[in-house]
Image (cartoon, grey):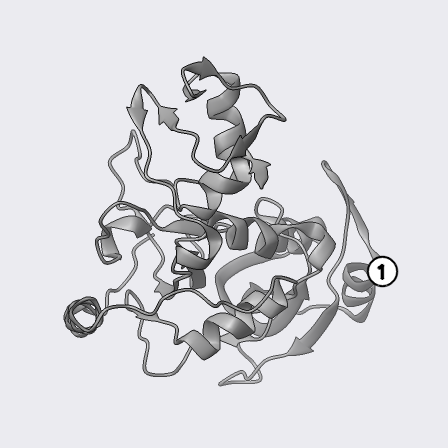
């Protein structure tokens, strides 16, 4: 049975399908000694090389599908490296051998909240794909009294520089004082364009002073997971995430007892962090 290169390497946790496609275009991948091209497929038993080094590839039933939930603080970037030396979300995650964590989408530097990571690039790709229409929910604090007209505009649609955008729903949040200049709202989106929540509010003349993602599909941040902490989802929860992404339930091998103990120890050591601006 043959499969597309990017699907096999993404499932192995080497990167997202999009990343791997750029590697193919850059000539970094060979199959059986020949440079790979987009659209090529891998047959069972073929050796794949990345930058001249052979890769150990597992079949679908041999690969563990792991998912982390991370409560990102403000003041962290979602890239692995930053020329400005800012802290990366990946610095807070547990270390892996022979694979890596792939972020499901991004949150900008000054946005906090729920981020999912997985070792399965196929799952990451499906969770981010627009066709699955997975809803994201944000708690947002805006400055100023919000008019009914502005709320109607945000629900009906606003033309931004990258196209029409709108919230699926807007609900008032809990405000400590009615006379406060800052007001909390809960808003939902089914896409992940760059700074979309902030840009939508800014289109109506409002400034966002705080922004936190509280839900991704049917996954919420548990109250025990403080800012800067993570937990690994159980196999049952991973299956729920897989179904949300329109993928079959996970049927791979479980973590070995020693691996599970290591993860639990790392989870206990993860300390809450206060994000900076």
Q: Where's residue 58, x and y in %?
A: 39, 47
The quarter holding residue 116 reads bottom left
Q: Where's residue 260, x and y in %?
A: 22, 71
Q: Where's residue 274, x and y in %?
A: 26, 64
**Vertical placement of residue 46 versus 139, above or below:** above
Question: In the image shown, does 33 or 198 lie closer to the viewer?
Answer: 33
Q: Where's residue 54, x and y in %?
A: 31, 28
The quarter holding residue 188 reads bottom right
Res 5 seen here:
no
For this view, does 82 lie left or right of residue 247? left
Question: In the image shown, does 142 or 77 lie closer to the viewer?
Answer: 77
- The residue at 42%/52% (across/down) is 110
Residue bearing mark 1: 156
Number of residues whose C-alpha sits closer than 10 Å to that of mark 1, classed few (under 14), some (14–19) or many (20 or more) = few
For this view, does 166 lie left or right of residue 20? right
**Vertical placement of residue 200 versus 33, above or below:** below
The quarter holding residue 208 reads bottom right
Provide the secondary structure element on which disc 1 rests.
helix
């Amino acid at each position: 049975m043959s499969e597309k290169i990017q699907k096999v390497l993404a499932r192995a946790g080497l990167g997202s399908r999009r990343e791997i496609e750029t590697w193919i275009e850059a000539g970094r991948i060979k199959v059986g000694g020949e440079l790979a091209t987009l659209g090529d497929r891998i047959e069972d038993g073929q050796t794949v090389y990345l930058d001249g080094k052979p890769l150990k590839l597992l079949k679908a039933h041999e690969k563990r599908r792991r998912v982390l939930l991370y409560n990102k603080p403000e003041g962290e970037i979602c890239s692995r490296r930053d020329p400005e030396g800012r802290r990366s979300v990946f610095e807070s995650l547990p270390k892996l051998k022979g694979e890596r964590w792939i972020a499901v989408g991004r949150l900008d530097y000054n946005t906090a909240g729920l981020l999912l990571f997985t070792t399965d690039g196929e799952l990451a790709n499906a969770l981010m794909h627009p066709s699955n229409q997975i809803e994201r929910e944000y708690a947002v604090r805006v400055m100023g009294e919000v008019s009914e007209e502005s709320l109607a505009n945000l629900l009906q649609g606003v033309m931004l520089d990258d196209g029409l955008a709108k919230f699926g729903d807007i609900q008032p949040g809990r405000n400590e004082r009615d006379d406060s200049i800052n007001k909390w709202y809960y808003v939902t989106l089914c896409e992940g364009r760059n700074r979309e929540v902030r840009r939508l509010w800014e289109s109506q003349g409002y400034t966002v002073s705080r922004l936190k993602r509280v839900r991704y599909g049917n996954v919420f941040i548990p109250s025990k997971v403080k800012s800067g902490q993570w937990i690994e989802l159980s196999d049952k929860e991973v299956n729920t995430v897989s179904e949300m992404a329109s993928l079959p339930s996970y049927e791979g091998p479980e973590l070995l007892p020693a691996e599970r103990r290591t993860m639990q120890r790392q989870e206990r050591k993860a300390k809450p962090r206060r994000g900076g601006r």
